[in-house]
């Protein structure tokens, strides 16, 4: 199916909590190999004694969300919340409105 | 009709309240399959005990707003308000004015 | 006349007050069919018990302002003020100056 | 003379005070027909009982400033100040410096 | 010499004080005719009883700074400070660093 | 392997502490020669009596993180934290969400 | 060597202190003639009785840092700190992270 006409999840932004090991580098690499993913951006938000919270931005033509969850679980990580989900034939960006100000 | 000369709703920004299930991922996927929609961006604004409020940005050449409403209803979600509606042959962006400052 | 050399109103930003019905979607669609209009962006600013105030951005090669006013009147809406008017052979954007800061 | 090599006034930003009539739409249209003007952006800054103050951005290859002044006078409007004047073979934009912060 | 390989002053930002006459429009026009200048942006910063302070941005392949100074003197204007000087084969923009914040 | 289809670490942002010698210039040059690196941006964050803290942004098609660590160690520098790790077939940028505000 | 594949210092941001003479214009011109430099942006940060502090941004394919230091010394100027050093086959820009906010 042409990547530009298929329906699928195009972007996810997750709030993820993980132990200190494995490192943020390994999490990014592992997630980048999930089916339908082009790239992953892992951003360190907070560090506590035992855990770290990451903001994870994932983009691709048809992200396999189940495989994302399994991959994170295999790394000992937990999804706190799904902050953004973008789906369809193209990525639609957020648009500022008076309600945001 | 050539998508660039047809009149239609080109972008909607909705304030939507939904139960925790189905997830924001499913809402984005379901809405992305509505007639005349190219893509959907669901952004988590607030989480309460029973419900979540989402900002939903929908773009396409000729969005079928009735089908959007039906789809959301089928997911147990409610439109709190329509914050932005863009129509015509092309998407016109907001323009900052002194009144906004 | 070539759209790029004709003089005309190219953009209007209006502060509009309307009743709750018809919806912002219908206002955008109706205005998008006015002569000389390419697109319309209706942004919800405030909601009161009886009325809503919208910021309406209209763009096109040669906007028929009279028809804009008639269309709004037919929808029960009133123009509070014309915040921006852009005219000429091309759209000239605002430019920040020390006086704005 | 090739518009790109001629010297001339390329942009003016004026602080203009005008009576409520004629409207900002008419001011924009009239100014857009001045010699050497490509486009005009009239922005409503303040409204008082008798008058309105506008920020007027004018762009073109070789703006006839005298004709701008005559046109505004014919509309009953007064130039309070010339906030920006750009001249030469091309438009040079402002550049932020530590002194601006 | 090819404008892109010659060394020269490419941009100057000056803090200039001038009397009310001649106007900012004349200053911009006169400076735009200096050797090696493509364009000039004169921005009104402050107005006092006798004088006005301008921010003057000048760009070109090889600005003749001496002639800029002479031109300003001929207009009764004084350079308070040279806030930015850019030289070389191309314009290098400022880059924000932690020290600026 | 085509650089655009290979999986690898595409960007790292590190918080690095180093002694005053060697200089930030040498650190940037040395890191830029690591396998799979296109470029390195070293930004001075803080200076103390004995040490300096740098923000180091590294980009390339397939950054060898082990070699980055070895190179930093050889320069007497220590990685305080890995703030960002981007992996996959392309660089995915951060996306602002309500949670960031 | 092809400028795009050679390793070298691509950008430096320096905090420089200099006497009032020579002027910022002469500093920019002199630095722009250093080997491997395409352009120089000198920005006036502070002025004291005897000295001025400049932010100096230098870009080029392979900046000769020793010659930069010699040139500044010849002008009576001193490097207070090297705030940014960018090296490699291309310029890598800074990337905002939560740690910067």
Image: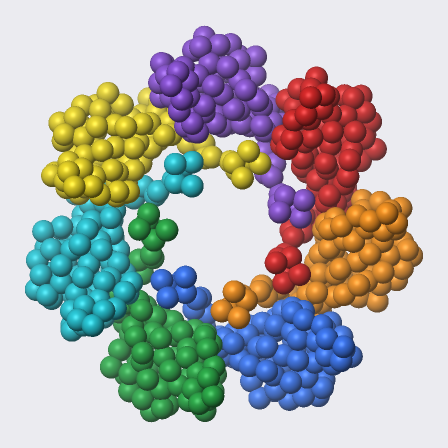
Chain colours: A blue, B green, C cyan, D yellow, E purple, F orange, G red
Q: How many marks?
A: 0
Q: Is residue D69 visible?
A: yes
B27 sits to left or right of A76 = left
Residue E21 percent coordinates (x, y): 36, 14
The residue lying at 61 percent from left, 23 percent from top is E8
The residue lying at 67 percent from left, 88 percent from top is A73
Residue A98, quarter of the rendered image: bottom left
Q: Is residue A49 above or below residue C46?
A: below
Q: Is residue A7 visible?
A: no
For the N terminus of chain E, which image quadrant?
A: top right
Of A21 and E76, the residue lying toward us: E76
The residue lying at 58 percent from left, 63 percent from top is F93
Q: Is residue B46 above or below residue G10?
A: below
B68 sits to left or right of A54 = left
Residue F34 percent coordinates (x, y): 81, 57
Residue E7, quarter of the rendered image: top right
Of G53 and A1, the residue lying toward us: G53
The residue lying at 18 percent from left, 61 percent from top is C17
Residue A51 percent coordinates (x, y): 72, 79
Residue D22 percent coordinates (x, y): 12, 38
Q: Is residue F9 above or below residue E69?
A: below
């Amino acid at each position: 199916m042409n990547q530009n006409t298929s329906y699928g999840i195009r972007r996810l932004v997750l709030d993820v909590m993980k132990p200190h090991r494995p490192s943020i580098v390994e999490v990014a690499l592992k997630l980048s190999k999930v089916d339908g993913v082009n790239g992953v951006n892992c951003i360190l938000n907070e560090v506590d004694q035992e855990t770290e919270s990451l903001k994870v931005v994932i983009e691709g033509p048809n992200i396999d969300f189940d495989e994302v969850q399994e991959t994170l679980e295999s790394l000992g990580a937990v999804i706190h919340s799904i902050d953004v989900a973008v789906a369809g034939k193209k990525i639609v960006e957020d648009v500022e409105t008076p309600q945001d100000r």
